């Protein structure tokens, strides 16, 4: 009887593993970064150093932003004439216009904060649960 119980437990784990693997194959990565990697064209010539990894789309920034935010709701977002700036827990997704379409830049928050702070300022929610330090004397200490 003991062997049968272990067999049933083993089969249950195998089925769960197969379901997880199937879901991963069909739906891709489980993050905003993974979503962009799976849905847009890689554009290495538009990378910013080793920090901001670039992708492109032939759609306008507002359309790309809508697509990404429908799949992954950002913690904060800021939109102005220069582009769309999305803040997630660990990553930023910045969508800037091109002559035709958009460039989508993926970057860790640790490097995105100094790069975009002058543009987004407090609109990106710095200090409201963000793990990035800053904000003045005594803040985050």
Image (cartoon, rainbow, N blue to C red):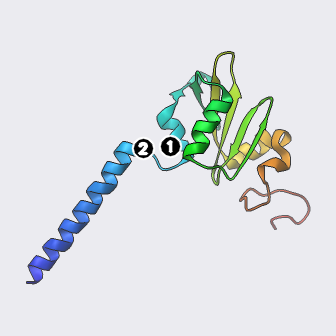
State the residue in front, 138 or 81.
81
Q: Quadrant of residue 82?
A: top right
Residue at the spot x=68%, y=53% of the render?
75
Residue at the spot x=80%, y=29% of the render?
81
Is residue 48 visible to us here? Answer: no
Residue at the spot x=61%, y=43% of the render?
69
Q: Residues within 10 Å of mark 2 (few under 14, many from 20)?
A: some
Is 92 placed above or below 126 here?
above
- Whichever of callouts 2 and 1 sits on the residue coming sooner in the sequence is 2
Q: Position of residue 64 (x, y in %)?
A: 61, 32
| Mark 2 secondary-structure assignment | loop
Q: Position of residue 30 (x, y in %)?
A: 48, 50
Q: Quadrant of residue 45?
A: top right
Q: Residues within 10 Å of mark 1 (few under 14, many from 20)?
A: few
Q: Mark 2 and mark 1: span between their CA atoms?
A: 7 Å
State the residue in front, 113 or 34.
34
Marks 2/1 in contact by CB < 8 Å: the verdict is yes
Give the residue pinned by disc 1: 34
Residue at the spot x=26%, y=55% of the render?
18
Give the residue pinned by disc 2: 28
Q: Residue furthest bottom?
A: 1
């Amino acid at each position: 009887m003991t062997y049968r119980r272990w067999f049933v437990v083993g089969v249950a784990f195998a089925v769960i593993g197969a379901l997880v693997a199937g879901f991963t194959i069909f739906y891709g990565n489980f993050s905003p970064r993974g979503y962009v990697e799976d849905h847009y064209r890689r554009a290495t010539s538009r990378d910013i150093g080793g920090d901001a990894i670039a992708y492109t789309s032939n759609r306008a920034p507002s359309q790309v932003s809508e697509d990404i935010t429908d799949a992954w709701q950002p913690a904060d977002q800021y939109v102005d004439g220069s582009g769309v700036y999305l803040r997630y827990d660990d990553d930023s997704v910045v969508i800037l216009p091109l002559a035709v379409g958009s460039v989508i830049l993926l970057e860790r928050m640790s490097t995105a904060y100094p790069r975009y702070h002058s543009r987004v300022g407090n609109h990106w929610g710095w200090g409201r649960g963000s793990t990035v330090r800053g904000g003045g004397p005594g803040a985050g200490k």
